[in-house]
Amino acid sequence: MLRFAIPSKGSGYDASLALLESCGLRVVRANPRQYTASLRGLPDTEVLLHRPADIVEKVAAGSIDIGITGYDLVAEQRGDDENLLVIFDDLGFWRVELVFAVPQGWIDVSSWDDLADLAVELRAQGRRLRIATKYTETVRRFCRTQGMNDFELIDSQGSTEAAPGLGYADIIADITETGTAIRDNKLKIVGGPILRSQAVLVGSRRTLRDNAPKLALVRQLLELVEARRRGRLFYSLTANVAGESVETVGRRVTARLELAGLQGPTIAPVWSKYAAEGDQWYAVNVVVPQEELLPAVEHLRNIGAVSITTVQVQHVFKAQSDAYARLLAALG
């Protein structure tokens, strides 16, 4: 059995279910209190529901084969552990940033350099800059790279935004999506993001290497997720175009190569119930990136197209899965 972990509750659980269902995979639980489930559409796979931080630990230890978690947790907990692999680096949800925030009254502090200078000033006064965070390893590494050496990290596993107001820290380093909680606690963000994070798929080098059955299941999952993530960026357009021949219509469509589809247009004759004798109509289909949708519609109109319809593409499969090829390379 392939052991596949997903977040047990909250937005991570809901988004994981939505992603899998969009790929044609459905998590089935006998009852909502169970922490195991099956995955319809991917045989021989057991779904395990865990806290995101536990998923990182268990995949690294090899007790779980693959799992969905946050990159911020991977960066914090992985260290030098080569057994923990990031198989898919952006699943499209859980986008947050790890930032520094200071009291709004600190009008002279607005950058990382200002924080470094403040740390030096406090050191001269006989104490260190106190930073409350649950990302102690990530923040420590970042501070060192920014030349900040005089600081004290206060481990905070909950309500980190309240730390300065309660007096047990000077500033915080915490994740935020909108910044609302930071502003509500009379704090402001300084500098840019320490780390940008999103949902990722991680895997265990120890349990996947040289295990052909498990790799075959992981490949199926990666193929579906990758194709679905790619497909949401494209639209399929179909239009009817009059012309003397397939070649004539094809030349008109490909006059703008960037709007002529992934490989080129598909053109087929249409048996028109309205055209006068001698007129020939063709159905033209092209697949274009989302940002080129309106330009493509205009181009088809300019060459005489009528009845233009669009459908958002569900999946785009390439000749091979890039994510699976990267996994095999990482496994050696």
Image (cartoon, rainbow, N blue to C red):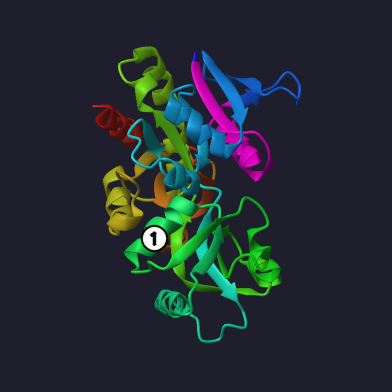
- The one nearer the camera, 68 or 52, is 52
- The one nearer the camera, 75 or 70, is 75
Q: Residue at horizontal 59%, vertical 24%?
A: 48
Residue range corresponding to the magenta coloring: 2-25
On the question of residue 118 being in view, the answer is: yes
Task: Name the residue type under label 1.
Answer: Phe
On the question of residue 320 being in view, the answer is: no
Q: Residue at horizontal 61%, vertical 42%?
A: 12
- The one nearer the camera, 57 or 256, is 57
Q: Position of residue 2 (x, y in %)?
A: 48, 18
Q: Residues within 10 Å of mark 1 (few under 14, many from 20)?
A: some
Q: Residue at horizontal 65%, vertical 45%?
A: 11
Q: Position of residue 322 (x, y in %)?
A: 31, 36
State the SS at label 1: helix
Find out whether residue 22 is within the magenta segment.
yes
Res. 32 image quadrant: top right
Q: Is residue 226 above or below residue 76?
A: above
Q: Residue at label 1?
A: 142
- The one nearer the camera, 34 or 220, is 34
Find out whether residue 229 is within the magenta segment.
no
